Image: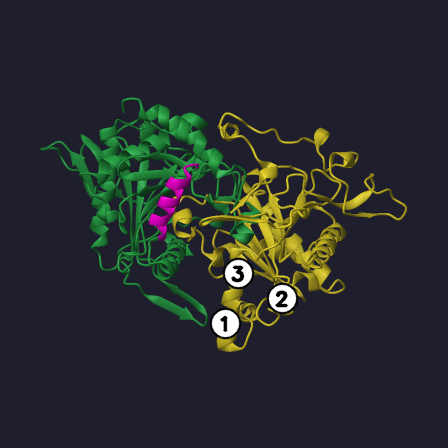
Chain colours: A green, B yellow
Amino acid sequence: MAVATERARRPDSFSQAVKEAVATRDVCPFCPGHEAMTPPEVLAYRAPGGTPNGEGWSVRVVPNLYAAFRLEPDGQEQRDGRFWQRDAIGACEVLISSPDHLAPTPLLPRHQVEEIVQSYVDRYRHHAQDPKQEHVLILYNHGRPAGASLEHPHSQLYAISLVPPTLADELQGGRRFHDEQRACVFCRTLDDERKAGTRIVFENDAFVVFGPFAARTPFETWIMPRRHTASFGDLDLASEKPAFAEALQLTLKALRDGLNDPPFNYFIHSAPLKADVNDTYHWHLELIPKLSTAAGFELGTGMWINVVKPEDSAAFLRERVQKLAGQPA
Amino acid sequence: MAVATERARRPDSFSQAVKEAVATRDVCPFCPGHEAMTPPEVLAYRAPGGTPNGEGWSVRVVPNLYAAFRLEPDGQEQRDGRFWQRDAIGACEVLISSPDHLAPTPLLPRHQVEEIVQSYVDRYRHHAQDPKQEHVLILYNHGRPAGASLEHPHSQLYAISLVPPTLADELQGGRRFHDEQRACVFCRTLDDERKAGTRIVFENDAFVVFGPFAARTPFETWIMPRRHTASFGDLDLASEKPAFAEALQLTLKALRDGLNDPPFNYFIHSAPLKADVNDTYHWHLELIPKLSTAAGFELGTGMWINVVKPEDSAAFLRERVQKLAGQPA
């Protein structure tokens, strides 16, 4: 558990009478012309001759003002009997999708989605070189019920100095499968899913979009590269970048059109930076729509009850993606 | 992951335009006079001479109409390559807190809270005798954002034929600690917490209420028996039942008064029914207010970012509980 003192609030600020205001376009720190409202940018794509921290960008990346992890501390530990804590070292960034306050990924031109993917890769590779970091997580929250606190579409990056538990579980599963079968469990899953066909949503030359067999929620969807690659940082910019942008945009558009713009989260699971898992891990994106509430059962058991069969979810999205894939982007 | 065919919905029923109606008192299946709207009761406390499935009950327990687990199937497995599934065997029950549609636990007379606890124990012990079951989970969801779909206050019971992952993790931690220290990690935690004092919310003769050191959310609070007991089914009805009812009600009332009735979930973690963990496990209740949204970071990492220090949460609740504890129940 991470205590974020930079975000700290007084206990009574959680009283249910207090409602936070949502930033409108007038005061949106991510809109062009408001660059001074954020910390100085760490990356931006501009036409040649553009001014840093000025307008005219297509994607802009800035440090997260409400960072749960910081680079400064030196990782001090405190131990008081069994109560152990250490500084949360890391970096938190916001990747602003486009200058348009009202255009989420499905509504952007395809080349802009490729720019977003390029910014993911650039910042991933940047943090992957920091010897203090163990893992880089890139994620997107859409809609207030899914935790998006600002309306202007943006992704987030967390570079952290530990391997998170969820990833550790996946790594362990991958290693165990490899020990037994001398194969990557993710590659095998792609083979099995393509053979079965019933949970496939979309395929192009480089990616497969499918509903996992043990989907946690209705419409949970994974996007996985066909090429066995442990790290997202190794995305091939020539062949895989446009294919990933296509798969991501079509999936999000099918979800938006089919379910009237539901809230969702997606995140990219990529190999830890320092572990040698090239044979056993395989990066992928997990998309989880927020269509139900994790309540006492889910919290108490760690199990999810899914009220839609993954085959039905996949068929619903597949039909919509097939229509969209025929349209010009 | 459990697919609940009994709750199955068509994919497009998740469109964000569809809103479910909340049952009002007129049509509430849990209100007195509406007993025929539920399956026949499996337990009810009534004055002698009362009629089963009639009015006049103080607590009433009925099978959950929307059960994710059923007793009927014989546990058939299906295997298609690596895709393995089996029937979800179990029992799901609803424990109606009182006849009063508008009275959650904090507003009930203390003797009624004791009746609720009695119903927990009775139904726990009933299902613990079923050789098909591995675990019994009792939980409470309060408020729509915490997943309560019916307004009338009620708890839920799940008897399931497997040990859930969250509990398996706790069991493993308890076993490892016991191997190293020859002691119960939960007993040791109680000692350490009482010595530190800063995260204690309330104590009586039999229970300690405290904010755990690694609290996942603001105001996460645990209620733990001082007597080392692995199973909730072994609650001592003479001494521990009233003490547990007191601790639970005061905690919920402090939360309600202090934060203006926030949504929350609580669940009781108790030993698996068949494992010999008498030395290493220690039952307890975990209360998790729903004050923030688990978003991409939490889903992607399995880690929680808590924006309030657990010491501040505990101090806030402690102050309110102390005032309440001085008042007549």
Q: Which mark is residue B146?
A: none
Does the magenta segment cover residue A192? yes
**Left-right relation of B44 to B184:** right
What residue did someone put label 2 on?
B230
Q: Residue at x 45, y 30 (%)?
A: A316
Vertical position of residue B170 compared to residue A206: above or below = below
- Percent position (x, y) of residue A41? 21, 41
Q: Secondary structure at mark 1?
A: helix
The residue at the point 39 percent across, 45 percent down is A192
Quadrant in which residue A23 is drawn: top left
Q: Which span is picked out in magenta?
A: A185-198
Q: Does residue A288 appear to the left or right of B245 in the view shown?
A: left
Q: Quadrant of the C terminus of chain A?
A: top left
Q: Which mark is residue B168?
A: 3
Q: Is residue B328 visible?
A: no
Name the secondary structure under disc 2: loop
CB atoms of marks 1 and 3 within 8 Å: no
- Residue A60, x across and y down, in percent: 23, 37
- The first of marks 3 and 2 along the sequence is 3
Q: Residue at x 39, y 42 (%)?
A: A193
Among numbered discs 2 and 1, the one appearing first in the sequence:
1
Mark 1 residue type: Phe
Of tags 3 and 2, which is closer to the observer? 3
Q: Which residue is mark 1?
A: B177
State whether residue B149 is above or below residue B13. Answer: below
- Say which of B278 and B225 sits in front: B278
Q: Are marks 2 and 1 in contact (CB under 8 Å)?
A: no
Q: Amino acid at mark 2?
A: Ala
